[in-house]
Amino acid sequence: MRKNIVAGNWKMNTTLQEGVELANEINTLLEGKSKNCEVVICVPFTHLTSVNAVIEPSIIGLGAENCSEHESGAYTGEVSASMVKSTGATHVILGHSERRQYFGENNEQLLAKTKQALANGLTPIFCVGEVLEERENGTYNDVVRSQVEALFSLSADDFAKIIIAYEPVWAIGTGKTATAEQAQDMHANIRHTIEEKYGKELADNTSILYGGSCKPGNAPELFAKPDVDGGLIGGAALKADSFIGIIEAFN
Ligand code: 13P
Protein backbone atom coordinates (compact mmCIF):
# COMPACT_ATOMS: atom_id res chain seq x y z
CA MET A 1 0.00 0.00 0.00
CA ARG A 2 0.96 3.61 -0.47
CA LYS A 3 3.02 5.42 2.12
CA ASN A 4 2.10 8.42 4.21
CA ILE A 5 4.75 11.08 3.76
CA VAL A 6 5.42 14.50 5.24
CA ALA A 7 8.01 16.38 3.20
CA GLY A 8 9.44 19.81 3.89
CA ASN A 9 10.31 22.22 1.10
CA TRP A 10 12.66 24.80 2.51
CA LYS A 11 12.65 26.83 -0.75
CA MET A 12 15.31 29.60 -0.76
CA ASN A 13 15.53 29.91 3.00
CA THR A 14 18.25 29.44 5.64
CA THR A 15 21.98 29.90 5.42
CA LEU A 16 24.02 26.72 5.47
CA GLN A 17 24.59 27.06 9.23
CA GLU A 18 20.91 27.73 9.97
CA GLY A 19 19.89 24.83 7.73
CA VAL A 20 22.23 22.37 9.43
CA GLU A 21 20.96 23.51 12.81
CA LEU A 22 17.32 23.09 11.75
CA ALA A 23 17.95 19.63 10.29
CA ASN A 24 19.79 18.61 13.43
CA GLU A 25 16.93 19.85 15.61
CA ILE A 26 14.31 17.96 13.56
CA ASN A 27 16.41 14.79 13.65
CA THR A 28 16.90 15.04 17.42
CA LEU A 29 13.20 15.62 18.06
CA LEU A 30 12.26 12.62 15.91
CA GLU A 31 14.86 10.27 17.40
CA GLY A 32 13.22 7.54 19.41
CA LYS A 33 9.76 8.85 18.55
CA SER A 34 7.32 6.56 16.80
CA LYS A 35 5.76 8.12 13.73
CA ASN A 36 3.24 6.89 11.22
CA CYS A 37 4.70 8.51 8.14
CA GLU A 38 7.93 8.91 6.26
CA VAL A 39 9.66 12.24 6.71
CA VAL A 40 11.70 13.98 4.01
CA ILE A 41 13.35 17.40 4.05
CA CYS A 42 14.09 19.06 0.71
CA VAL A 43 16.79 21.68 1.06
CA PRO A 44 18.86 24.03 -1.11
CA PHE A 45 21.63 22.37 -3.16
CA THR A 46 24.30 24.09 -1.06
CA HIS A 47 22.98 22.39 2.09
CA LEU A 48 22.61 18.81 0.89
CA THR A 49 25.98 17.35 1.90
CA SER A 50 26.13 19.06 5.28
CA VAL A 51 22.51 18.26 6.15
CA ASN A 52 23.10 14.67 5.13
CA ALA A 53 25.87 14.49 7.72
CA VAL A 54 23.55 15.42 10.61
CA ILE A 55 20.44 13.39 9.82
CA GLU A 56 19.83 9.70 10.31
CA PRO A 57 18.60 8.19 7.01
CA SER A 58 16.26 5.83 8.86
CA ILE A 59 14.55 8.87 10.42
CA ILE A 60 14.62 11.54 7.70
CA GLY A 61 15.00 11.29 3.94
CA LEU A 62 16.86 14.05 2.14
CA GLY A 63 15.83 15.77 -1.07
CA ALA A 64 16.80 18.58 -3.42
CA GLU A 65 14.33 21.16 -4.69
CA ASN A 66 15.14 20.81 -8.39
CA CYS A 67 17.60 19.22 -10.80
CA SER A 68 18.70 19.76 -14.38
CA GLU A 69 17.01 18.05 -17.31
CA HIS A 70 20.49 17.43 -18.74
CA GLU A 71 22.85 14.66 -17.75
CA SER A 72 26.06 16.74 -17.61
CA GLY A 73 28.06 19.26 -19.59
CA ALA A 74 28.15 22.95 -20.45
CA TYR A 75 25.14 24.19 -18.48
CA THR A 76 26.70 26.78 -16.19
CA GLY A 77 24.99 27.02 -12.83
CA GLU A 78 22.90 23.90 -13.24
CA VAL A 79 22.97 20.89 -10.90
CA SER A 80 22.47 17.42 -12.32
CA ALA A 81 20.50 14.54 -10.83
CA SER A 82 23.71 12.52 -10.46
CA MET A 83 25.28 15.40 -8.47
CA VAL A 84 22.23 15.49 -6.20
CA LYS A 85 22.39 11.73 -5.76
CA SER A 86 26.10 11.86 -4.93
CA THR A 87 25.38 14.03 -1.85
CA GLY A 88 23.37 11.22 -0.30
CA ALA A 89 19.99 12.68 -1.27
CA THR A 90 17.16 10.29 -2.08
CA HIS A 91 14.43 12.63 -3.33
CA VAL A 92 14.00 15.64 -5.57
CA ILE A 93 11.10 18.06 -5.91
CA LEU A 94 10.25 18.67 -9.57
CA GLY A 95 7.78 21.02 -11.21
CA HIS A 96 7.06 23.14 -8.18
CA SER A 97 4.72 25.96 -9.22
CA GLU A 98 7.44 28.51 -8.38
CA ARG A 99 9.72 26.78 -10.92
CA ARG A 100 6.93 26.67 -13.49
CA GLN A 101 5.95 30.30 -12.89
CA TYR A 102 9.27 32.11 -12.36
CA PHE A 103 11.61 29.91 -14.37
CA GLY A 104 9.27 28.93 -17.19
CA GLU A 105 9.58 25.18 -16.66
CA ASN A 106 7.27 23.39 -19.06
CA ASN A 107 5.90 19.87 -19.31
CA GLU A 108 8.57 18.75 -21.76
CA GLN A 109 11.43 19.90 -19.51
CA LEU A 110 9.75 18.41 -16.46
CA LEU A 111 9.49 15.05 -18.16
CA ALA A 112 13.21 15.24 -18.99
CA LYS A 113 14.03 16.19 -15.38
CA THR A 114 11.90 13.33 -14.11
CA LYS A 115 13.76 10.90 -16.38
CA GLN A 116 17.10 12.21 -15.11
CA ALA A 117 15.97 11.82 -11.50
CA LEU A 118 14.74 8.27 -12.07
CA ALA A 119 17.84 7.27 -14.03
CA ASN A 120 19.90 8.34 -11.02
CA GLY A 121 17.80 6.53 -8.44
CA LEU A 122 16.14 9.65 -6.99
CA THR A 123 12.46 9.66 -6.05
CA PRO A 124 10.74 12.60 -7.75
CA ILE A 125 8.17 14.56 -5.75
CA PHE A 126 6.31 15.86 -8.78
CA CYS A 127 4.21 18.95 -8.15
CA VAL A 128 0.99 19.86 -9.90
CA GLY A 129 -1.64 22.50 -9.20
CA GLU A 130 -3.85 25.16 -10.68
CA VAL A 131 -3.63 28.95 -10.33
CA LEU A 132 -6.45 31.00 -8.81
CA GLU A 133 -7.92 31.95 -12.19
CA GLU A 134 -8.19 28.27 -13.15
CA ARG A 135 -9.85 27.46 -9.83
CA GLU A 136 -12.33 30.27 -10.38
CA ASN A 137 -13.10 29.55 -14.04
CA GLY A 138 -13.62 25.86 -13.31
CA THR A 139 -10.80 24.46 -15.47
CA TYR A 140 -8.73 23.24 -12.50
CA ASN A 141 -9.40 19.55 -12.98
CA ASP A 142 -8.33 19.68 -16.65
CA VAL A 143 -5.24 21.74 -15.81
CA VAL A 144 -4.03 19.31 -13.17
CA ARG A 145 -4.94 16.30 -15.30
CA SER A 146 -2.74 17.59 -18.14
CA GLN A 147 0.14 18.24 -15.72
CA VAL A 148 -0.06 14.62 -14.55
CA GLU A 149 -0.44 13.35 -18.13
CA ALA A 150 2.87 15.04 -18.99
CA LEU A 151 4.49 12.01 -17.33
CA PHE A 152 2.43 9.39 -19.14
CA SER A 153 5.16 8.40 -21.57
CA LEU A 154 6.94 6.82 -18.59
CA SER A 155 6.75 3.08 -18.12
CA ALA A 156 4.53 1.81 -15.31
CA ASP A 157 7.68 0.72 -13.45
CA ASP A 158 9.01 4.26 -13.59
CA PHE A 159 5.73 6.01 -12.81
CA ALA A 160 5.35 3.78 -9.75
CA LYS A 161 8.45 5.41 -8.25
CA ILE A 162 6.95 8.92 -8.31
CA ILE A 163 5.29 10.83 -5.46
CA ILE A 164 2.72 13.39 -6.60
CA ALA A 165 2.19 16.64 -4.70
CA TYR A 166 -0.98 18.62 -5.35
CA GLU A 167 -0.34 22.25 -4.54
CA PRO A 168 -3.05 24.71 -5.53
CA VAL A 169 -1.01 27.81 -6.35
CA TRP A 170 -3.53 30.10 -4.68
CA ALA A 171 -2.93 28.29 -1.38
CA ILE A 172 0.88 28.47 -1.37
CA GLY A 173 2.26 30.86 1.21
CA THR A 174 -1.04 32.72 1.32
CA GLY A 175 -2.46 31.31 4.52
CA LYS A 176 -5.43 30.23 2.42
CA THR A 177 -5.62 26.42 2.55
CA ALA A 178 -7.74 24.35 0.21
CA THR A 179 -10.52 22.85 2.28
CA ALA A 180 -10.07 19.19 3.11
CA GLU A 181 -12.95 18.49 0.69
CA GLN A 182 -11.29 20.45 -2.14
CA ALA A 183 -8.05 18.57 -1.54
CA GLN A 184 -9.82 15.20 -1.39
CA ASP A 185 -11.73 15.90 -4.64
CA MET A 186 -8.58 16.80 -6.52
CA HIS A 187 -6.56 13.92 -5.07
CA ALA A 188 -9.30 11.49 -6.10
CA ASN A 189 -9.23 13.00 -9.61
CA ILE A 190 -5.48 12.65 -9.82
CA ARG A 191 -5.69 9.04 -8.66
CA HIS A 192 -8.41 8.38 -11.21
CA THR A 193 -6.28 9.90 -13.99
CA ILE A 194 -3.40 7.63 -12.98
CA GLU A 195 -5.72 4.62 -12.82
CA GLU A 196 -6.98 5.24 -16.37
CA LYS A 197 -3.42 5.06 -17.67
CA TYR A 198 -1.63 2.62 -15.37
CA GLY A 199 -4.40 0.66 -13.66
CA LYS A 200 -5.95 0.53 -10.21
CA GLU A 201 -3.14 -1.16 -8.34
CA LEU A 202 -0.51 1.37 -9.36
CA ALA A 203 -2.92 4.28 -8.74
CA ASP A 204 -3.77 2.93 -5.28
CA ASN A 205 -0.09 2.64 -4.47
CA THR A 206 0.79 6.21 -5.50
CA SER A 207 1.32 8.63 -2.63
CA ILE A 208 -0.39 11.96 -3.32
CA LEU A 209 0.61 14.78 -0.97
CA TYR A 210 -1.19 18.07 -0.37
CA GLY A 211 0.73 21.35 -0.23
CA GLY A 212 -0.35 24.92 0.44
CA SER A 213 -0.52 26.60 3.86
CA CYS A 214 -0.52 23.23 5.62
CA LYS A 215 0.01 23.71 9.35
CA PRO A 216 -0.27 21.62 12.55
CA GLY A 217 -3.80 23.03 12.98
CA ASN A 218 -5.20 21.91 9.62
CA ALA A 219 -3.03 18.86 8.87
CA PRO A 220 -5.18 16.34 10.83
CA GLU A 221 -8.31 17.20 8.84
CA LEU A 222 -6.48 17.15 5.51
CA PHE A 223 -4.60 13.91 6.23
CA ALA A 224 -7.79 12.19 7.39
CA LYS A 225 -9.11 12.29 3.84
CA PRO A 226 -8.77 8.92 2.10
CA ASP A 227 -6.78 10.17 -0.90
CA VAL A 228 -4.55 12.63 0.97
CA ASP A 229 -1.39 10.72 1.83
CA GLY A 230 0.52 13.50 3.53
CA GLY A 231 1.86 16.94 2.85
CA LEU A 232 4.52 18.99 1.12
CA ILE A 233 5.18 21.75 3.61
CA GLY A 234 6.70 25.18 2.95
CA GLY A 235 6.66 27.81 5.67
CA ALA A 236 5.75 25.43 8.50
CA ALA A 237 8.75 23.21 7.63
CA LEU A 238 11.15 26.00 8.62
CA LYS A 239 10.45 25.63 12.34
CA ALA A 240 11.13 22.28 13.94
CA ASP A 241 8.12 22.42 16.25
CA SER A 242 5.56 23.18 13.53
CA PHE A 243 7.08 20.58 11.18
CA ILE A 244 6.93 17.96 13.95
CA GLY A 245 3.37 19.08 14.72
CA ILE A 246 2.39 18.23 11.14
CA ILE A 247 4.17 14.85 11.31
CA GLU A 248 2.20 14.14 14.50
CA ALA A 249 -1.04 14.61 12.56
CA PHE A 250 -0.49 10.99 11.48
CA ASN A 251 -0.36 9.67 15.06
P1 13P B 1 3.47 26.86 2.17
O1 13P B 1 3.32 25.66 3.09
O2 13P B 1 4.39 27.90 2.70
O3 13P B 1 2.15 27.39 1.72
O4 13P B 1 4.20 26.30 0.84
C1 13P B 1 3.73 25.16 0.24
C2 13P B 1 4.72 24.75 -0.78
O5 13P B 1 4.89 25.41 -1.80
C3 13P B 1 5.48 23.52 -0.55
O6 13P B 1 6.14 23.11 -1.69
Image: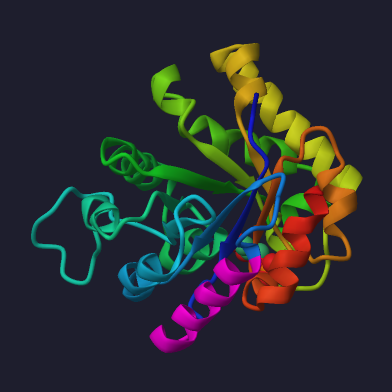
Quadrant of residue 147 within the rendered picture: top right
Indicate yes or no whether the magenta region holds residue 179: no
- Residue pushed farthest left? 73
Residue 77: x %, y % from top left: 21, 72
Q: Is residue 200 left or right of residue 245?
A: left
| The quarter of the displayed image where residue 84 is located | bottom left
Question: Between 168 and 32, which is closer to the camera in this rendering?
Answer: 32
Ligand 1 in which quarter: bottom right
Residue 21 is one of the magenta-drawn residues: yes
Rendered residue at 69%/68% (across/down)? 243
**Percent position of residue 75, x then y:** 15, 63
Q: Is residue 214 among what the camera can see? A: no
Classify residue 143 by image quadrant.
top right
Q: Is residue 76 left or right of residue 144?
A: left
What percent of the width, then of the height, locates residue 135?
78, 51
Tag count in the figure? 0
Task: Name the one closer to the observer, 167 or 51.
Answer: 51
Segment colored magenta: 14-29
The x and y percentages for residue 145 are: 63, 33
Q: Residue at left 24%, top 65%?
A: 78
Q: Nearer the viewer, residue 113 or 243?
A: 243
Residue 161 shows in the view: yes
Q: Is residue 214 above or below residue 163?
A: below
Image side of residue 110 versus residue 202, left or right: left
Residue at 28% x, 52% y: name it. 85
Q: Is residue 114 above or below residue 100?
A: above
Q: Main secondary structure of the magenta part?
A: helix
The quarter in which the N terminus is drawn is top right
User: In terms of depth relative to the viewer, which is nearer, 200 or 113?
Assistant: 200
Q: How is the image coloured?
A: rainbow
